[in-house]
Image: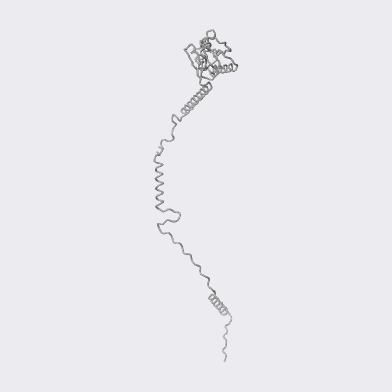
């Protein structure tokens, strides 16, 4: 007698049976599938223990030592510094920094510059004249001067008015600076022309209220200033040529 096969009616239970079979097949396939190789895990680096120095950072003791050295250096630098008194406010001008002090320093600078220039001119004159300086004699009435290379007999002739006068210059009515410039230009011109002896009339100062200014300056002009470059000797003129109000000037060749 044959066994009758069971049949499962269709419906929700039939679908459930199919799902059960599908899950069983997937579990069987998973068991037979080769396992993927497991990846090795890199062990983590141990953290530095407390009190040890990490790379790039100084030890705590080193930082403390560096900070102490910086504090000591700062203290040495600031040891001579005195704090300003806030109550005093701005620093006032002193006598040397005020307007009057500045003007005084400027005047002193100009005076020093003038002295340097005069010294330089004197040095140049000494070089140009071979170191020959004037021997000047002034007794208050008569004045004369000569270079060392002027012969004594030529000086005697000049003093006595024995040399012919080639030209004359009258300084009457001129102020000191104007007269000095005129004298320099006159001597330079006559020397260029080859003249030998000239007469410079400076006056006696009889019509002035003070001393004869030009009389006191003429010897200086002829022996120390630019005019001296053209002069070999000079002497107060004879009475016939003006006496104490004029001088003979012997020009250099």
Please tell me how many numbered marks the rendered image carries.
0
Q: Name the image colouring.
A: one colour
Q: Quadrant location of the C terminus? A: top right
Task: State the image coordinates of residue 25 (x, y, percent, origin top left).
Answer: 55, 77
Q: Position of residue 188 (x, y in %)?
A: 57, 18
Taking 14 as reference, is 64 above or below it? above
In the rendered structure, the answer to whether residue 54 lies left or right of residue 241 reads left
Compared to residue 241, the image places residue 128 above or below, namely below
Residue extending furthest toward the top? 240
Q: Which of 115 and 144 lies nearest the eye of the viewer?
A: 144
Outermost residue, bottom side: 1
> Residue 19, position in %: x, y?
56, 77
Q: Nearer the viewer, residue 156 or 224?
A: 156
Residue 157 in the image, given as x and y percentages of width and height? 53, 10
Q: Residue furthest right?
A: 193
Q: Quadrant of the N terminus?
A: bottom right
Of 163 and 29, the residue lying toward us: 163
């Amino acid at each position: 007698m044959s066994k009758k096969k069971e049949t499962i009616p269709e419906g929700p239970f039939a679908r459930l049976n199919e799902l059960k079979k599908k899950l069983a097949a997937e579990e069987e396939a998973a068991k037979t599938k080769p396992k993927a190789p497991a990846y090795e895990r890199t062990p983590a680096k141990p953290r530095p223990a407390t009190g040890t120095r990490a790379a790039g950072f100084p030890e705590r003791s080193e930082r403390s030592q560096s900070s102490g050295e910086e504090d000591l250096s700062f203290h040495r630098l600031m040891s001579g510094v005195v704090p300003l008194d806030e109550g005093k406010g701005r620093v006032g001008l002193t006598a040397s920094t005020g307007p009057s002090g500045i003007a005084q320093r400027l005047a002193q600078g100009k005076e020093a510059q003038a002295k340097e220039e005069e010294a330089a001119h004197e040095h140049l004159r000494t070089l140009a004249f071979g170191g020959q300086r004037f021997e000047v004699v002034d007794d208050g009435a008569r004045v004369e001067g000569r270079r060392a290379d002027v012969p004594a007999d030529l000086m005697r002739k000049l003093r006595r008015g024995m040399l012919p006068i080639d030209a004359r210059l009258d300084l009457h009515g001129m102020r000191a600076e104007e007269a000095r410039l005129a004298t320099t230009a006159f001597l330079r011109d006559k020397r260029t022309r080859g003249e030998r002896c000239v007469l410079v009339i400076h006056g006696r100062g009889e019509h002035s209220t003070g001393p004869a200014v030009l009389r006191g300056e003429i010897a200086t002009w002829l022996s120390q200033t630019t005019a001296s470059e053209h002069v070999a000797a000079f002497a107060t003129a004879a009475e016939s040529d003006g006496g104490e109000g004029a001088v003979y000037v012997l020009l250099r060749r």
